[in-house]
Structure formats: structure tokens, C-alpha cells
């Protein structure tokens, strides 16, 4: 309110025409400065209002209403105008407005599935004044909160501390010595993960109720256009628009028998019911890598079984090489590449080993090391859409390997390349565009934007991803291979620049100097094509890069951004400056 009133307690902008005032008195700003101050206040307050469900009138007081949209648009810099437009789009109408549903349906929007994507869609629907219901299927939070992202981070946090405290050489560098063996309580570690999931799921459920979203405990099944049935009953509810958000489940290849004790997926592994001496991890993607980090820290030996020609096949090649040096080779980890685990037979914990038949991926012949006997096998071979019980057949919808086909507005298509089914949307893992929790949330918000008549498409190329190993790996945009291919196809000059944690004061202070950051860019235009980081807190550092890509910020502009010293983000400063021939100290 102070800013919106045209006064500031901080220094006036260098280009303003503020008059001299006595020390301690409010600085009087010019008309232009007042306008800029009001715009800045709105840019901050409107998103906060949306997040906390305030009425627009609470924020857009008589002071703010005096700001002319046309004059602001004419006078503010381009990016400020874009910011104001985005805030205006996202803020009207906010929760607290009367619910709609005066069109003959029970609701404006029904959401089937209550993972991160469904929850995000529900909250945004209410912020737009839509009468909303969500089918939770008794699983508020979905895979991410209950069986994925959230509890796995709790295990990784505990395992990371065990690993650090067991590293005598690392601690010696700080002048620290731990007397005796480092011990952990397996049950307490597991309880920490379970309690975290429970708390987050409870908070998500409470937020739905607080904003006026009706929750339906059963799973939902589409029976016809605009109608969803409560699974296991004959009761139905209707809505003008329906969003499908059923999520995904672990994929278990044929020939693998899951018993949940000695052969299991990530769903069961998160329970941490025991720590096997030797674990085979089938698949070396994000999930497999994170669990290798947990198991090796807690004392297990790990053998990867990877069907592709290289470990970590979905990661950037240079990142793979660094990861091999710091995540694989120094630890009790070995593995096979170009090998299938075609048969996995469960054993008994502590009594009978798991038997794994190994087949060469190219020759299809059994390899000499087969069968492999281990204490346990973790199956990390990807995930498949949870769409079998959605009732898609009732609408004549054809899927591709279970994935619901959608266009860029998240509207469901009747088949691959087919026609749009009116008023039906699908978000998250079930559409297969990008199987990440935060991508699902972005898609849910986008679907609501399109439902209320504001055309919106998610740019998935600007969505970051992270692997929470020690050290972490994070990325956004294209890999180096993809960026080079794009340059060759479109005829521009490919550029690459890097920064090193070994030259970073904060990383050196933490004795965590392993890692790199590299920026891939278009030399002709300065466009950032991708960024890849491996190192301490990479998952946090990547967001700056994702924001820059989303805003269209060039490497030339990024090279002049000031980074706090000494911080880890100076690794990125080094890479940005290197992209334009500058040096970072």
C-alpha cells in the first residue's frame, strides 16, 4: 500500500525525478515514478493474492484502480508490460467470487485424480471462481506425495547425512572427527519418510477444503460426455468440463515377478522394510540413480542392469561422464549395459536369493554371468499411464500404449492425430508429454486457463528436471546432442560454455568442488537452448536457467546479471560470461 500510494522508504530509482526531502521523511516521487511504483506493487501483490485466495478488491484498492492500464502499457518497458499482462490474466476472478455452475451441470469442472497435477488444477479452478469437484480415489497427493518425489527426498536426506558422516576424509577437511561408527535406525528413517508424506497429503487435502473444492473419495470413471461415475457405485456427477489426471504406475516388464519384499518397485522400496546386502537395480534412470544413492549410503552393494548401450542413457553425455566419476565409480556399484533382465524370481529375505536371468540385448542370448543371484531386485524400468479404469472406451477414445492423446491445450483427442473431444482435458503422466509432477501442475493450470477462455499452451522445453543424488544433477532444455542437431537443421551456429564448481568459493568452502555447469546456446541470436548441471544444489541452481529460458533472456543479457558473492550460482555466472567471451573472477 505504501508503494501503491506513490511513496517509498528505499532509495528512489536513479532515473526518477524525486525531490529532495528531509532525512527520514517519505520521498515524493514524480508522476512517472508513482506509476512505476504502483506497477511494481501490483506485480508483487497480485500473485500473492491468487496464492492466498484474496478477493481482487483486497489488492486492487482505490489507489491501484487509479493506474490506467493503457497508459501503463504505453510507458512501461516491454518486460514490465508482459508481467502486468500475466498478472492480470492470472488474477481475475479470484477465489471468493461466487461459484458458477448455473448451466444445468452439478459443477463447472470435475477433476479425476488428485495428484500434484489434479490438485494444481483444482486450486486454479477455484481461483477463477469455478465450482469444482475432484475425485481423489482415496489418494490425495498421488504418486508424488505418497510413493514418489516427497518420501524419496526424505530417504535421500537421511542417507546423505549418513554418507557425509561416514566420510572421515571429508570431515577431516573441516577439522571434524567422528568418534566410533556412524549408526542409523532404519525404522526411524522409514518413519521420517512416511510422516513427511502423511503431513504433505493432509495439507493438500486441507487446502482443497479451505478453497471450497468438493472432494469425492472414490475413483472416477467417465460414462459419457460431461458425466463421471463414482467407481463402485451407480452415482454420477456432471460438469461442463472434465479434466483427467489419473497419473501413472510403475512399469513391470514381462517375466519379472513382484513380491514386494525381495523384488519390488519404487512404491515398495520407499517403505525401507530392510537393507539388503546386495541389490540389483533394473534401469539406470532418475529413480534407479536416486535409490542407488540411498542404498550405497546405508551399506548395500548395487548392480545396475541397463538395457541401453550406456548407463544413464537419458542424461547429457558430458554429465554422464562426470556422474560416472563421482556417483558410480567411487561407490560399491557395478553394472551391465545392453542387457535385459528377462526373468526375475523372488527369494526370501536373509534365506533365499533372488534369481535373475540376463539376456544380451543385441544377440538375445544368455550372457555368461547369468543367472545372477542377489539379495533383492529393484525394478526401475519406467512408468505407464494409469488409464485402464478411466472409462475411455465409453467415449470411443483410443490411447497409444495407454497414453491419452492431447493437443497443446491439453484437450483430449479421440485418437492419435484425431479430433478434439469437446470439454475433455487430460494432464500429467497420463498424456505422456512430460512425466514430472511440476509439469503436471503446469498442465493443470493451463487446462483451466483454456477452460475459462484464455488460450494457453505449456512450453515443455522450459520445464526443468532434477535427480537428487549426492551430488545432484539438473537440466532444462536440450541435451548437447539435440542442440547440435537443431543447429544443423535450422542453420545457426551452436555454442557451448561452461562453469566449474572447482573454481567456486562457496563450493570450496563446503568441500564440494565436484561438478560442472554448461550452457548450450545459439551463437547467432543468443538464445539459451539448454543448461545442464551436476554439483551441490544443482536442483536449486537450475531454476534461474529455466526462468531465463522462459523469459527469452539471451546469454548476452545473462552475462551482465549480477550474482551474489560468494554463492554457488556464480558457477552459472562463469558459464554465462564465457558464452560472450567474458571472464568471471
Image: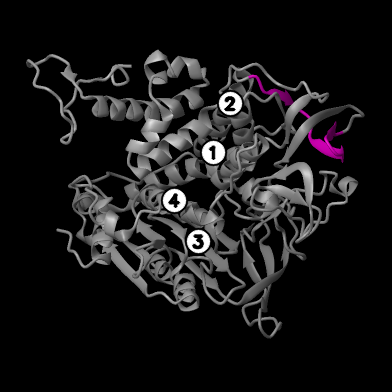
Q: Which residue is mark 2?
A: 127
Pointer 3 residue: 301
Whole-angstrom CA distance, mark 1 to mark 3, is 20 Å
Chain-order first, disc 4 or disc 3? 3
The numbered mark, 2 or 4, whose residue comes first in the sequence reads 2
Query: Is 227 part of what is drawn in magenta?
Result: yes
* Residue neighbourhood size for the residue with mark 4, other residues' Cα within 10 Å, grouped as few (<14), some (14–19), many (≥20): some
Q: Which residues are magenta?
A: 212-231
Residue 194 vs 386, above or below: the answer is above
Q: Secondary structure at mark 2?
A: helix
Q: Which is closer to the viewer, label 4 or label 1?
A: 4
Is 228 colored magenta in this rendering? Answer: yes
Mark carried by residue 380:
none
The local crowd at label 1, few if under 14, some if 14 to 19, many if 20 or more residues have their Cα within 10 Å, is: many
- Dot 4 or dot 1, earlier in sequence: 1
Q: Pointer 1: what residue?
A: 190
Tell me the residue at 55%/58% (across/down). 288
Q: Is 339 in front, or is 39?
A: 39
> 102 left or right of 14?
right
Q: Nearer the viewer, residue 154 or 569?
A: 569
Q: Position of residue 36 (x, y in %)?
A: 29, 30
Residue 452, position as x, y percentages in the image: 65, 34
Amino acid at each position: 500500500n505504501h508503494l501503491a500510494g506513490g511513496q517509498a522508504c528505499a532509495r528512489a530509482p536513479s532515473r526518477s525525478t524525486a525531490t529532495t526531502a528531509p532525512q527520514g521523511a517519505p520521498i515524493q516521487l514524480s508522476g512517472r515514478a508513482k506509476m512505476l511504483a504502483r506497477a511494481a506493487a501490483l506485480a508483487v501483490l497480485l500473485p500473492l493474492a491468487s496464492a492466498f485466495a484474496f478477493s481482487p478488491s483486497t489488492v486492487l484498492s482505490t489507489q491501484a484502480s487509479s493506474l490506467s492500464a493503457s497508459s501503463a502499457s504505453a510507458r512501461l518497458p516491454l518486460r514490465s508490460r508482459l508481467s502486468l499482462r500475466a498478472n492480470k490474466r492470472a488474477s481475475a476472478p479470484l477465489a471468493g467470487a461466487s461459484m458458477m455452475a448455473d448451466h444445468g451441470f452439478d459443477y463447472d469442472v470435475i477433476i479425476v485424480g488428485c495428484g500434484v497435477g489434479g490438485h494444481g488444477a483444482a486450486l486454479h479452478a477455484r481461483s477463477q471462481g469455478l465450482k469444482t469437484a475432484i475425485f481423489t480415489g482415496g489418494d490425495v497427493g498421488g504418486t508424488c506425495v505418497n510413493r514418489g518425489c516427497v518420501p524419496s527426498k526424505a530417504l535421500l536426506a537421511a542417507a546423505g547425512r549418513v554418507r557425509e558422516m561416514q566420510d572421515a576424509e571429508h570431515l577431516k577437511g573441516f577439522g571434524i572427527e567422528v568418534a566410533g561408527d556412524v549408526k542409523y535406525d532404519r525404522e526411524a528413517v522409514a518413519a521420517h519418510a512416511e510422516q513427511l508424506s502423511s503431513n504433505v497429503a493432509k495439507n493438500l487435502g486441507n487446502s482443497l477444503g479451505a478453497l471450497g473444492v468438493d472432494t469425492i473419495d472414490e475413483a472416477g470413471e467417465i460414462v459419457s460426455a460431461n458425466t463421471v461415475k463414482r467407481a463402485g457405485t451407480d452415482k454420477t456427477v456432471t460438469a461442463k468440463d472434465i479434466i483427467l489426471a489419473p497419473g501413472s504406475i510403475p512399469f513391470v516388464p514381462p517375466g519379472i515377478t513382484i513380491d514386494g519384499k525381495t523384488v519390488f518397485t519404487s512404491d515398495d522400496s520407499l517403505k525401507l522394510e530392510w537393507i539388503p546386502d546386495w541389490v540389483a537395480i533394473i534401469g539406470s534412470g532418475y529413480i534407479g540413480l536416486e535409490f542407488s544413492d540411498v542404498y550405497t549410503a546405508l551399506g548395500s552393494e548395487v548392480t545396475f542392469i541397463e538395457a541401453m548401450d550406456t548407463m544413464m542413457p537419458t542424461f547429457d553425455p558430458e554429465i554422464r561422464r562426470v556422474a560416472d566419476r563421482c556417483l558410480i565409480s567411487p561407490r560399491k556399484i557395478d553394472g551391465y549395459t545392453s542387457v535385459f533382465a528377462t526373468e526375475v524370481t523372488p527369494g526370501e529375505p536373509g534365506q533365499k536369493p533372488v534369481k535373475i536371468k540376463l539376456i544380451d540385448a543385441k544377440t538375445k542370448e544368455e550372457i555368461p554371468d547369468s543367472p545372477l543371484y542377489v539379495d533383492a531386485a529393484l525394478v526401475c524400468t519406467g512408468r505407464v499411464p494409469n488409464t485402464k479404469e478411466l472409462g475411455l472406451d465409453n467415449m470411443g477414445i483410443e490411447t497409444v500404449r495407454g497414453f491419452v492423446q492431447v493437443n497443446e491445450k491439453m484437450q483430449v483427442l479421440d485418437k492419435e492425430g484425431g479430433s478434439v473431444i469437446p470439454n475433455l482435458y487430460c494432464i500429467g503422466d497420463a498424456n505422456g508429454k512430460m512425466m514430472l509432477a511440476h509439469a503436471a501442475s503446469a498442465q493443470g493450470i493451463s487446462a483451466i486457463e483454456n477452460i475459462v477462455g484464455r488460450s494457453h499452451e505449456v512450453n515443455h522445453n522450459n520445464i526443468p528436471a532434477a535427480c537428487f543424488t549426492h551430488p545432484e544433477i539438473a537440466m532444462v532444455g536440450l541435451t548437447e546432442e539435440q542442440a547440435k542437431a537443431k543447429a544443423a537443421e535450422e542453420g545457426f551456429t551452436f555454442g557451448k560454455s561452461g562453469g566449474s564448481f572447482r573454481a567456486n568459493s562457496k563450493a570450496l568452502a563446503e568441500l564440494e568442488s565436484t561438478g560442472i555447469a554448461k550452457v548450450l546456446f545459439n551463437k547467432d541470436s543468443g538464445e539459451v537452448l539448454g543448461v545442464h548441471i551436476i554439483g551441490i544444489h544443482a536442483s536449486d541452481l537450475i531454476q534461474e536457467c529455466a526462468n531465463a529460458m522462459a523469459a527469452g533472456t539471451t546469454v548476452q543479457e545473462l552475462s551482465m546479471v549480477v550474482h551474489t558473492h560468494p554463492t554457488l550460482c556464480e558457477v552459472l555466472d562463469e558459464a554465462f560470461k564465457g558464452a560472450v567471451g567474458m571472464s568471471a573472477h
